[in-house]
Amino acid sequence: MAKVDEEFVACMEDVIEIYGLPLNEKNPVVCFDESPFQLLREVREPMPGAPGRPRREDCEYERCGVAEVMMICQPAAGLRKCLVMEHRKKTDFAAVCKELDRMFPKAQKITLVCDNLNTHTKGALYTTFPPEEARRLAKKIEIRHTPKHGSWLNIAELEFAVLGRTVFKKRIADKEQLQRELDAICAHRNAEAKPVRWQFNLSKARAKMAWVYPDVVNESS
């Protein structure tokens, strides 16, 4: 089996074990992901909905650029927060790490699950902050990458699926309005505080994805 598959297995099992950890304020497990959002401005005023008639929008619209939505979620606590940024550069990832530091001030360590984009590194902290602050954040935040072609292991993608059915279906013209919409839905869902119950444990992974595991032959002594 190719080396990449062995690495896939190792990363996958690491992430699955992380999701099995109990809720711990000293070591919160947090997932992070990014998604672009096309800002659109209405060309004509939509017709409001009425009983028996849905809201109607004109097929024409004006493109107003693209914003990057940064999703932070703590699955075991049912907590999520979104940040709207202009880019997804190293400095933006570093800003997310700084936000995690503010969200979990009592944490001794934050385990951060994210994909292996080249900006998702501790080096981004040193690009953005003075060395003392970068080192402090680097020691507090432990980055754990999902495997290549395995971003489905990132629970933050489930949160984006919710946004795809709600906020992302709307025509929103600017980043400020987008942030307000995201704040509102996050506040609504956080009020419910429903934890994500991750069911894909190691035994299920090894049974369902046996094809990605190397064939190991035990040599008799």
Image: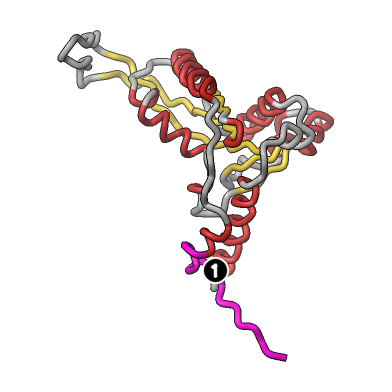
Q: In this orientation, does residue 219 appear?
A: yes
- Which secondary structure is most common in the magenta stretch? loop
54 sits to left or right of 115 = left
Q: What residue appears at the point 59 percent right and 51 percent down from the top-left corner?
A: 16
Magenta segment: does it hold 180? no
Q: Position of residue 14 (x, y in %)?
A: 64, 54
Q: Position of residue 20 (x, y in %)?
A: 63, 47
Q: Which residues are magenta?
A: 207-221
Give the camera-side residue of 42 and 184: 184
Dot 1, how many residues are within 10 Å of its Cα: few (below 14), some (14-19), or many (20+)?
some
72 sits to left or right of 179 = right
Vertical relation: 210 (above or below) 124: below
Type of amino acid at the residue the image marks with label 1: Tyr
Q: In this orientation, does residue 85 appear?
A: no
Magenta segment: does it hold 220? yes
Quadrant where the N terminus sits is: bottom right
Q: What residue appears at the point 33 percent right and 25 percent down from the top-left corner?
A: 169
The quadrant where residue 104 appears: top right
218 sits to left or right of 46 = right
The quadrant where residue 23 appears: top right
Q: What residue appears at the point 76 percent right and 34 percent down from the top-left corner?
A: 26
Vertical relation: 185 (above or below) 44: below
Quadrant where the C terminus sits is: bottom right
Give the camera-side residue of 68 and 99: 99
Vertical relation: 101 (above or below) 188: below
Which residue lies under the disc numbered 1? 213
In this view, which residue lies farthest toward the right?
132
Q: What residue appears at the point 68 percent right and 90 percent down from the top-left corner?
A: 220
Count the marks: how many? 1
Q: Position of residue 93 (x, y in %)?
A: 62, 33
Q: Position of residue 159 (x, y in %)?
A: 47, 33
Element marked by disc 1: loop
